[in-house]
Image (cartoon, rainbow, N blue to C red):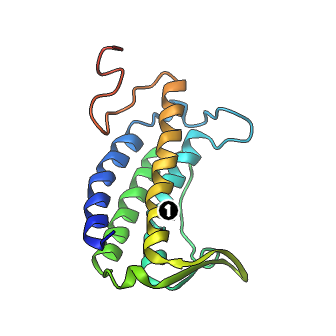
Amino acid sequence: MSIHALTAEFEHEVNSTRKLLQAVPAKDIQYKPSPVSWTMGELAQHIATIYHWYAGTLRKDVYDIVADKLERGSPDNIEATLQLFEENVEKARAALQQTTDEDMQRPWTMMAGERTVLGPLPKGIVARSFLFNHIYHHRGEMIVYLRATGNKVPGMYGPTYEEMGGK
C-alpha cells in the first residue's frame, strides 16, 4: 500500500476515531466489563496514545517505546484524553507527510529497553498492523463499552443500528 493511500485512510479514520472518543461520557469513565479489562477512560487514552506512536514508527528504524515518554494525564479526564488525541493526530499527520513509499519498505524494530518486542518488519507492515489495525481493534472494544453502558454509538461507516431505529 502506498503512503498516499495510507494518508487518505488516516484522514478518513481520524474523523471516525474523534467521533467515537467524543461519545465517551464522563459518567461512565470508570466502567470496565471485567476485572482484567481497562476502564473506559483507560481504553480511550490508549486509543489516543496509539497516534503518538506514528512518529516513532515512521521516523525511526528502531523505536524504543520505553524511552519515548509521553505525558498522558489522567485517564479519568475525557477532555484531557481528547486533547491528547488531537495533539497526537497532528504529530502523526506530520510523520505521514514526511514518509515516502521507499521509507515504508525499510526494516523497523520496536524495543522495550534491551528487549525486542516487534520486528524487524517492513515499516509498511508495521504501519498497517501496529498503527491502523490496532486502532480499529480498540475502537471496536470502545463500541462494546458504550453499548454496554447504554450510551449512543456514533455512526462511523454509515448509520448505526440505533440511528436506524433499531431495525
150 shown above or below 6: above
State the image coordinates of residue 119 (x, y, percent, origin top left). 60, 76
Q: Is residue 165 above or below residue 11?
A: above
**Residue, x 45% and y 49% (percent of image)?**
136
Q: Residue at x 45, y 37 (%)?
A: 24
Residue at (54%, 66%) from the top-left corner? 71
Q: Residues within 10 Å of mark 1 (few under 14, many from 20)?
A: few
Q: Label 1: which residue?
A: 129
* The quadrant where residue 25 appears: top left
- The quadrant in which residue 151 appears is top left
Image: 137 above or below 96: above
Q: Quadrant of the C terminus?
A: top left
Q: Quadrant of the N terminus?
A: bottom left
Judge by depth and name the residue closer to the eye, 99 or 46: 99
Number of numbered labels in the structure image: 1
In x, y percent, where is residue 74?
A: 57, 52
Q: Position of residue 155 (x, y in %)?
A: 31, 34
- Is residue 153 toward the left or the right of residue 9 in the image? right
- Quarter of image, res 21: top left
**Where does residue 144 sit, x and y in percent of width and height?**
52, 32
Q: Is residue 145 left or right of residue 95?
A: right
Q: Secondary structure at mark 1?
A: helix
Q: The residue under label 1 is which amino acid type?
A: Ser
Look at 45% across and 85% down and name the residue there.
Answer: 106
